[in-house]
Amino acid sequence: MDYLSRFGPFSRPRWHVPVVPMLYPQSQPQPRPKREDEDVFIPPHHSEFGLEDPVEDEEGGFEYEEQDHQRRRVEEAVDYDLEVEEHYEEEEEEAPRHVPPPQQRNMQQEIPWSDVLAQDSTLHKLRPYSYRPSKGNWKHVAISSFPSGRGLYDRDLKRPCTQLRIITWNIDYMSDRHEERLDEALRYIEEDVLRSKEDGEPEPCCILLQEVHAKVLPYLLRNEWIQRWFMVTPIEPRRWPEGQDYGNVTLVARSLDVTECFILHYGPSVMGRTAICVNVKLTFPGTDDKAVVAVVNTHLESLPPGGAVRPKQLDLCSRFLRRTGIHGGVIAGDMNAILPVDATIGKRLELKDSWRKGDIEIGNTWGYQGNDGFPNGRLDKVFYLPGMGYKVDEPKRIGVGLKIRGNSESALWVSDHYGLDTTLRMLKPRSNSS
């Protein structure tokens, strides 16, 4: 049964949790076989609730000194109505220098939509990675796992940031010459959009990319500007749903204080779509007060049949903004808003559209640079949770008319989508004095 028909558009189910051994053990926790390619990391929140570090048992499973962990796992899953699948990561894990792409996935595969609607979504913990010149490789960044946003070792390691630039762009995985198009897109963002300083340092920003092809991901990680100034998550295609040859990638300026990262695999998806959430700590102007806001990078289901699941996918995204300890945030990306019902799904979820002029031509983001016969439209959007002590600027379109190798008629468009550029600005608290 569809989520909206069961609970309504705004309600949160209390105890609709998939029954899996990890959440409801019969007697003792059941050991889970570890895949050969699986990382190892300490489950989130174990230290926050006074739990001992997990100890690997003889059969490869994990046991805990305190049983309270199972109850906390249930509460976390209830927040999302999801099955939480945790990967475990070695502290000294290195990113592979060359990532082979997974097998090709057929976007048009025949899967009954009734089966798609019945699938469970899964939430996976991610780490951001930064490039270490001394190692010549990308290494994961040690961050806090506390939703409240306390920094590593309970200290503030980054300078205060009162505003956050947000760029979202579907960079088109289907067209040829992926590396050339990505290279031009990154050059354009660095020089024309962010207008980075002479040394290349960008202002505090998050760059949300959709349709990043698996074979171009290693090329992105070799970009010198990205290596010097950004954290990246994820850095491997295997973090996307199994079999996907493209997915979302989020770039986070190193000047930002990141507290958590997740990737949500939509259960109701034929096309293996996901949402990446990065929580960052921002400061209210003129104060030392801080808040953690969620920045969600998503790509909703495509085509008219996808209209059956896009509302549920966006609803799941909105829960990142409403978690305990999170002070709202934004959901940005390719919303594939092609049906009349898509124009209202944000409003039904009490989200605000940062574009304030409605669905008029100057707001369209797709259809002008290779549309395959479909009508033009405002497929890409930036939603935010209002009334949380910040404002979000009306986005500007980027990448309009951008081609590789000049502007000749034979040149290839960098993407079939325009991107969007906006800024989230924390507001100075009102004085209580009369």
Image: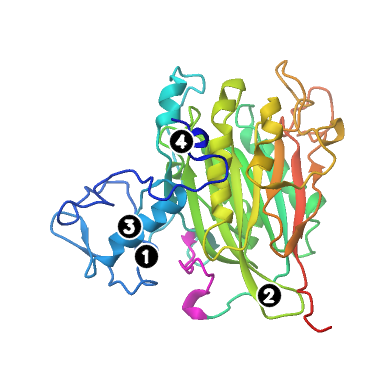
Identify the secondary structure beneath mark 2: loop
Q: Along the polypeptide, which appears first: circle 1 or circle 3?
A: 3
Q: How far apart are the alpha carbons under marks 2 and 1? A: 28 Å
Of tags 2 and 4, the one toward the viewer is 2
Question: Mark 3 = which residue?
Answer: 40
Dominant secondary structure of the residues highlighted in magenta in the image: loop
The numbered mark at residue 321 is none
Q: Three-letter amino acid code at disc 3? A: Val
Dots 4, 1 in contact, CB < 8 A? no
Q: How far apart are the alpha carbons under marks 4 and 1? A: 25 Å
**Residue drawn at point x = 61 percent, y = 40 percent:** 210
Q: Three-letter amino acid code at disc 2? A: Pro
Across and down, in percent, residue 38 comes to 32, 49
| Structural crowding at the residue carrying mark 1, measured as other residues with C-alpha within 10 Å and reported as few (<14), some (14–19) or many (≥20) | some
Q: Along the polypeptide, which appears first: circle 3 or circle 4?
A: 3
| Structural crowding at the residue carrying mark 2, measured as other residues with C-alpha within 10 Å and reported as few (<14), some (14–19) or many (≥20) | some
Classify 288 as above or below 235.
Answer: below
Dots 1, 3 in contact, CB < 8 A? no
Classify 102 as above or below 254.
Answer: above
Across and down, in percent, residue 296 comes to 60, 50
- Left or right placement of residue 107 versus residue 90 in this view: right
Residue 210 is inside the magenta segment: no
Q: Nearer the viewer, residue 33 or 91?
A: 33
Of tags 2 and 3, the one toward the viewer is 2
**Residue drawn at point x = 16 percent, y = 60 percent:** 57
Question: Mark 4 = which residue?
Answer: 101
Across and down, in percent, residue 175 comes to 64, 27
The magenta stretch spans which residues?
A: 138-154
Question: Mark 1 = which residue?
Answer: 91
Question: Mark 2 = which residue?
Answer: 160
